[in-house]
Image (cartoon, rainbow, N blue to C red):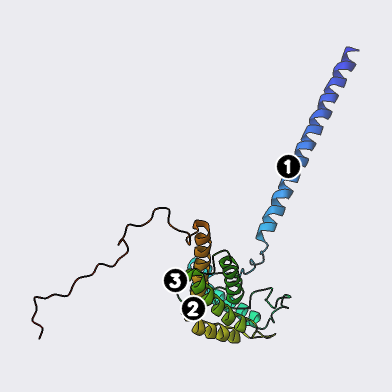
Amino acid sequence: MTFSLSTAARRSRSLISASCQSSSGSHQLHHSSALIRAKYASSVSQPPPAFEVPKTEREVADMLAKAGSNEERKRIFDALKGVQEVAAKVPPKARGPAGVHLIPIGRTKLTTNQTGVDVHHSPFESLSKTYQDTLKALEKIPASTVYRQAVHSTTRNNLEIIKKYLSAAVPGETADAVEQRVKAAENELGVEMIEKAIEQAEDEHQLVLKMIEYKAWQELEEKPAPGQWDYFEIPASTSYPKN
């Protein structure tokens, strides 16, 4: 009986040991297979990342600065040129009920050639909205004030100019035709670039809002002293000979 128990115990230990070795071997085999698959996957060539079109002049400069070689820079220029050619063939979408474009006018120009000034891709829409907002805000200023009369006249004239060139857009208009309209508008507005006109319009609109906030047309709480705003005049000298 003692012999049978010891024999059974030895057999049990043998079976357990064999089972453990089999399990360890299976785990090692699974681990090796995973390493092989990972190595194979890393060796397969990955597709190149999609070209992301830069939206501003600064992004173009950053992209070219990060290029590691002249060949890479050439590929970037070729890609940008292809984007311009495709964009020039895309016709503008429909207008809104008020005749205003629902999307940018389709400018593909990448730079203004002036550091710090990015190309505005929908200048007519932006100017039209800003001018209309300014005219609406001016209604809160008394009509008798010189400021309202002057700003209203200038803003209304500029708005008519922008509306004229905004309505001149035609379906399938090329990028060159768009730039010609922009250039003509710049000449009538008296600015070197239309982006400057946008800045001026936004500044004027903010000034109107400040005038309304401060009620600049009202009388001063502290009246100026008599002669405070008189110009300093130098009387004509009498020491020089008359002739």
Q: Which residue is mark 3?
A: 115
Name the foreground residue: 7 vs 186: 186
- Using residue 141 as the reference point, say whether residue 45 is left or right of it: right
Q: Is residue 182 above or below residue 208?
A: below
Q: Nearer the viewer, mark 3 or mark 2?
A: 2
Q: Nearer the viewer, mark 3 or mark 1?
A: 3
Q: Quick one: label 3 or label 2, which is nearer the N terminus?
A: 3
The residue under label 3 is which amino acid type?
Answer: Thr
Q: Quick one: label 3 or label 1, which is nearer the N terminus?
A: 1
- Using residue 21 as the reference point, say whether residue 65 is left or right of it: left
Figure quadrant of residue 234: bottom left
x, y (%) of residue 164?
61, 84
x, y (%) of residue 191?
47, 79
- Determine the residue located farthest toward the front in the rendered image: 226
Q: Is residue 240 above or below residue 143?
A: below
Element on which disc 2 rests: loop
Q: Which residue is mark 2?
A: 193
The residue under label 1 is which amino acid type?
Answer: Gln
Q: Quick one: label 1 or label 2, which is nearer the N terminus?
A: 1
Q: Which residue is mark 1?
A: 28
Name the foreground residue: 175 vs 68: 175
The quadrant of the image that shows the C terminus is bottom left
Specify whether residue 178 is in view: yes
The residue under label 2 is which amino acid type?
Answer: Met
How dense is the environment of label 1, judged by Cα within 10 Å: few (below 14), some, or many (20 and up)?
few
Name the foreground residue: 152 vs 117: 152
Q: Residue at x 54, y 83 (%)?
A: 185
How dense is the environment of label 2, judged by Cα within 10 Å: few (below 14), some, or many (20 and up)?
some
Distance Cα–Cα, label 1 vs label 2 = 70 Å
Q: Nearer the viewer, mark 1 or mark 2?
A: 2
Specify whether residue 67 is in view: no
